[in-house]
Structure formats: structure tokens, C-alpha cells
Image: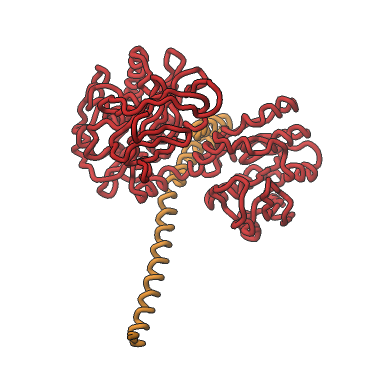
Chain colours: A orange, B red
Amino acid sequence: MKLRVPESIKSRLRANEEADRRLAQRVAALEEAVEENRKLNQRLADVVDVVTELLVPAMDRDDDRVKKALADLGKTLDDG
Amino acid sequence: MTRGYDVSAQGILVPSSLDGSVDVLFGEQRVWSFNPARDGRSGSGGTRVDWPRALVPHLEGVADVQLVDHVSREVRHDQRVRFSPGDGKVSVVDADGNPLAVDKGGRLQRDFSNTEQGAREEIMDALEAVLHDLREKCGLDTYLMYGCLLGAVRDGHMIGHDSDADVAYLSRHTHPFDVIRECTAATRRMRSLGWQVVPMSGANFKVWVPLPDGRRCGIDVFGSFHANGRFHVTGSLTGTLDRSALVPFGTVTLEGREIVAPARPEDVLEFTYGPSWRVPDPAFHFDHDPVDVQRMSAWFRAGRARLRFWQDFYKSPDSARVPVEPSLFARWVHERLDGPADILDLGAGTGRDAAYLASVGHRVTAMDFTWQGWGRTQAIRKQEKVRVARRALNLEDLRSVLVTGARLAHRGRVRQVYARGLLDTLGDSGRDNLWRFASMVQRRGGETFLEFRTPRSRAEQKFFGVHQRTFLRPDRVAAEVEAYGGTVVDRQTGRDLAPLGKENPHICRLVVRWTA
């Protein structure tokens, strides 16, 4: 015997599926945003480091010290 | 042959009942250890374990193979194996003839099991000197960690199958941003003290210490910190560990010397290796929760994304399949240039195009984040009598981009930027950095030449099989360039522009200017 599912239940199931799909999309978007925010720590730390090391010699218009600061900053690069 | 065992070029077959760590010896030399339950595949005939990738290129000739229980030292199986035709003995040594073994990271390394007592004393001297400077000069609360702590607590000695010495420091900070800044400062300070330091991530680094016999010993320095109620140690160790297990620091004895260690080393070892940490297991490798690995990678390792892939690629046999002759794109760019130019070849790889461009009269600087593939075209450079300068550039690392870009921009020459296949290998942040870099170094003019696969090639078979590739729509690239202030002055798309074997991808070539 074939069981007949009432239209109201079918409709609720469809609504639940749609809610699940939207939730999964929101979680994926949040995960992406969290990942991006975590990566900002390194990027911001690098910018702060470069600015900190360069700001004073740059304000002093001391080209030799600017070059030295850049060379020293270069030394902290990954040499693979 | 022992019943249920067989060793061949295809792998090792052991009885399904075998458990625990098994050392694989070629003659007297341990070359690898495995755990059948963890590393093998169960089948009707027993458990089959594949050879680790790093060992495969060495399996040429004949070897007397022994499988030995790591703890009891009982020889489980003994077999003469012919891996390939010829009577030469299988040799797993480095260029200087030193024996190598596969470490827990899957790489061939010299380990402490082949280290004489004299060298152990020198390694301990180096470890103490590094610990001293980390504590006294860098102000880091440093303690013994990982394999060194394990060896010290187990029997007071370094673990034979370890290849590096491990220490950690307990950060005074609780936010990744501050942890990174603290590590950067320590890296810089250690360098200024004369140590050879290689950053491994935003929160750990390696100190290479030369030993009197010409070898060098790596001392890994791992950042550790509490954040959001959890304790984190780089690489990817994350969990619950009370601060009282760490401080106030005590000492343990390693190779007869008192070394700073956590307050309760047993608790730290259980946190690190699990409850069975007392049982020796050279086949051990961490089985971190992927969520923890992802978190630590995003915090500290984004700049090294894809680095290991390319290092391994250029070390693999696939590297020999990279053509040595110049690409069609290199010839196309040369024809467009009006006489000898200064060219930055970004993502130079083996240097095949850099060598060609130099041979036709350009001044070329090859830039990349690994030089593993560079040797492939050494003979060509020598034959053509060309010189190509090399400079490190990591486009996933904003510091590298800013510093290298600023230094080049400061030298007031007009440069051309050449990037073939580079966009295919970068992620969004790397591409963002590429536009920043190109616009910095071409403030005085020049053009950026780009060649990349389009999404029409996504589903097609590739000459090099599975790689992490990005397929970009030309319109999207053009929009990004324009958002950075650049102008696309030429655009070509089509096939037959970069055929390789049976692969004939749909290609886009763009020429970009960053000046009016």
C-alpha cells in the first residue's frame, strides 16, 4: 500500500531542507571569514614590523639607515 | 622466508597480527620505521605497507633487509631483496656518504642513531648555547620540548630516531598577533647574535648550528602560548594543559646535563603524545584534528602555503619532465621588447625562460621562493655563458613583497615583469600581493607580462597530473589589475599558445602597464 504524505508535511519538509541549505551556506561563509581574519594577524604583524623599522630613518631622511633597515628586514625573510 | 612476510620493490607485507613499531634495516642501517596498524592496508594475505616516497628513488640494486621489533629488538624477518636489475647495493646516504633515515615528517634525514658520542656532546653544547641566548638575550622563557623532552624523561638520552633538537618557549602573550611579533623580534635578535636562523612559520624557527666535523645540527624553536583557555604549541598541537604543568620551570637530565624543562614533564608528554608516550615508537606521527591544523596554519603558516608542495615537486622525478627549452611565451615576450631590458622572472622555477631571456641579451633576475628546481638548467646557463641573478621572493608573504618591492623600486631602473604560469599557482592573497609588487617595481615604467590557464582548461587532463591550480577568468584578472591602478594594454586568448605533451590548455596572455 502506498503511503500518502499530506501536502502540509511535504511543505514543512521542503522548508526544513531549505533552512538546512541556508544554514550550511552561512556556516561555510563564516568559516571563510574566520580563516581570513586569522590570516590577518600575520599580515598586520608584517606591516607593523616594516613600518616600525622604516618610520624613524624615513622621517630623519637618513637614506643609508633606510637602506640598512630594509636590508635587515630582508634578512628575516624565509630563504626557502 | 618467514611465513607471512615479504619485502619487494612494491612494499612490505607483514602478518595482520603484527603490532607495534617495526624498524626497517638495510644491512646494519635503520632506514625507516613503520607501524603496520597505522601505516598499512589490511588484506586477505596480511597487511601491506608502501615504501615511503622519500625512500623510493634509493631502491636501486640489492639489499639485505631486516624487519626488527623496535622495542624488543627481535628480528621478525630477514630477506635479501633485489629491487632492480644489477648487483649494486642499495645505498641510502647523503652526498657525503652519511647514512640517512626517513623521519616522522616523511623526509630523509641524518638522525641521532648514527651519531657518535663526541658529536652528541657537540650537539648538547649547541643546544645549551641556543637555550642561553633565547633566555638571556631574547627574553624568552624557553624549555625542552617534543623529542628531546621525551628522550630526557625516558632514559636521559636523545632519541636515536630523532634528527633535530627541539625546544619551545612559553609566550607571555595570548593573541596570535603578539605571538608573531614576539617571534619576529626573537628571530631578528638571534640573527644579530650571529646565529643562522630560518623562520619556519610566524611562531617557530630553526637555528642551524655548525658542528666541528662540518655537519650542522638543527635546533627547532617552537612558540607556545595559552589563548582562549587552550594551550597551543607550533606546529599544530592544541588542547587543554594547565599553566601549572609548565611553570615554574624545573629541569631534566639530557645526556648528563641539566636542562630547563616544564614543571611536570610527564603531563606535557601526555598532552603531546597521548597516554602511551612511554612506549618507544619511531613510526609515530601526529594525528592532529584538522580543525586545529587549519587554525594554526591560518595564524602562522599562510606565508608558507604551497612552499612544501613546490619543494617536493622539484625534488621528485616529475621535475625531470619540465622542459628545458624556452616556452613560446618567452619568445613572444622577447619579440615585443625593444632591445635589451631588465626583466624580473617571477616564479622562475627551473629557470628555463630566465636562461633563454638572458641568452638573447636581457638582464634577468629570477625570483622564486624555492631554488630546488634551479639546477635543472645550470648546464644551459653554462653552455650559453649567461648569468642570471637570483633573488628570494615569496608572494604569499606580505613582508617579502613589501621589502623586496621597496628595494627594487628604490633603484630607479625601468623593469619588465615576466610571470608565466604564476597566476595558476597563487591563491587570492598571493595574487593580491603580485599586483602590489608589480605596481611598486614598475612605477618608473615597464610592462607586466602574464600567461595563465583559463577556466576552460579546468576539467582537461594535465601533463603534470594533480596540482593545486587556480583557473582565472581573464575579465576577473583585468578587473583586479584595474583596481590596483593598472591598465591591460594587450590581451590574447586561445589554444596552441602553451602546449605541453598531450595538454593544450586554453590560455590567456595579458600585458599590463602600471604607469600612464
Name the foreground residue: A54 vs B329: B329
In terms of depth relative to the viewer, which is nearer, B216 or A10?
Answer: A10
B47 vs B205: above or below: below
For the N terminus of chain B, the image quarter is top left
> Against B62, is B496 above or below?
below
> Horizontal and vertical percent for residue B454?
64, 56
Is residue B456 found left or right of B95 in the rendered image? Answer: right
Q: Position of residue B54 (x, y in %)?
A: 47, 33
Q: Position of residue B315 (x, y in %)?
A: 54, 34
Q: Nearer the viewer, residue B450 or B92?
A: B92
Can you give x and y, in whole percent of width and height, for residue B207 in the image?
41, 26
- Whether residue B184 is visible here, answered yes or no, is yes
The answer, for residue A5, to whether it is visible in the render is: no
Where, by quadrant of the figure, is residue B14 drawn?
top left
Classify residue B167 as left or right of residue B476. Answer: left
Picture quadrant of residue B407: top right
Between B125 and B445, the residue placed more toward the observer is B125
Q: Residue at x 71, y 29 (%)?
A: B380
- The residue located at (32%, 22%) in the rendering is B132
Q: Report the number of numbered marks.
A: 0
